[in-house]
Amino acid sequence: MDILDAGILGIVQGLTEFLPVSSSGHLELGKAILGDNSLPKESLLFTVVLHFATALSTIVVFRKDVAEILRGLFQFKWNEETRFSLKVVISMIPAALIGLFFEEELEALFGGNIVLVGFMLIITALLLWLADRAKNTGKKVSYLNAFVIGVSQAIAILPGISRSGATISTSVLLGNDKTKAARFSFLMVVPLILGKIAKDLLDGNLTENGVETPLLITGFITAFIAGLAACTWMISLVKKSKLSYFAVYCFVVGIVAIIFEYA
């Protein structure tokens, strides 16, 4: 991997973390088209650095919200910030359980199953199309909503299901305000990313790597900048009900993927 590869991977990570197109699905398609050995095999450390960059970009975009949540939590009262934090914790439960008990089964799905990716992209397209047509409200995310959205996040582990697309669409279809849905979707993933990084550090998985420091810095910077742009853009798209563009894209790519596999 060189500087250009690191920069491209950073941009791809920054964009696909927030835009509803499924980064895992596109990675599987890329491996099928180019061959498993054609894509650079970045180390775990490099991957972690990219995810940390996108988590940081989320914190920057929602810095006022994060500051209010932290201030509220340190008041040690049952206030709005405490309730929101509890909802985030509830939303994390399904994905955490799936990742803990079905890790090997999930890894087996990332073996070039292009038909699965194609159908999952079509499901993502349907969710985005339905969410785009939902009426906007002023409703906040409830505790039950948080769990259901968390289930969507767990399902989005499947290659081809967009995490942001699934969680935002589910929230909007439950009747929540579109801006609040996007805010909750992006903030709920930050603890999961930071928790995964902490787990890798504690397990010692990041001690050995073959990635040079300039590549890590390049990947981090490009992922952070792309994440800032994509996160801000996505909030605007959800508010303006323009997810249908991504729905069409995911549908077309899904159909092409299925045809490609059987051609």
Image: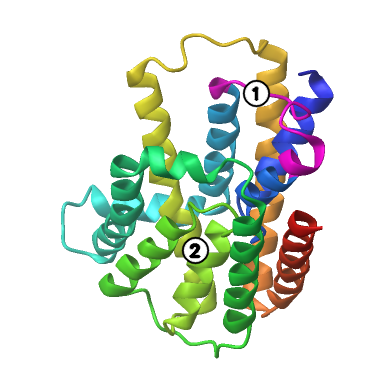
Identified at 64% across, 61% down, the residue is 20
Read off the residue under disc 2. Answer: 183
For the N terminus, the quadrant is top right
Identified at 65% across, 23% down, the residue is 42
As shown in the figure, which amino acid type bears the numbered disc 2? Arg
Query: Left or right: 59 with respect to 122?
Result: left
- For the residues marked 2 and 1, what is the alpha-carbon distance in whole angstroms? 30 Å
Query: Which element is circle 1 on?
Result: loop
The colour mode here is rainbow
The segment highlighted magenta reads: 30-45
Query: Left or right: 130 with respect to 167?
Result: right
Read off the residue under disc 1. Answer: 42
From this view, report whether residue 170 is shown above or below residue 36: below
Relative depth, front residue between 57 and 50: 50
As shown in the figure, which amino acid type bears the numbered disc 1? Glu
Find residue 101 and report its image quarter: top left
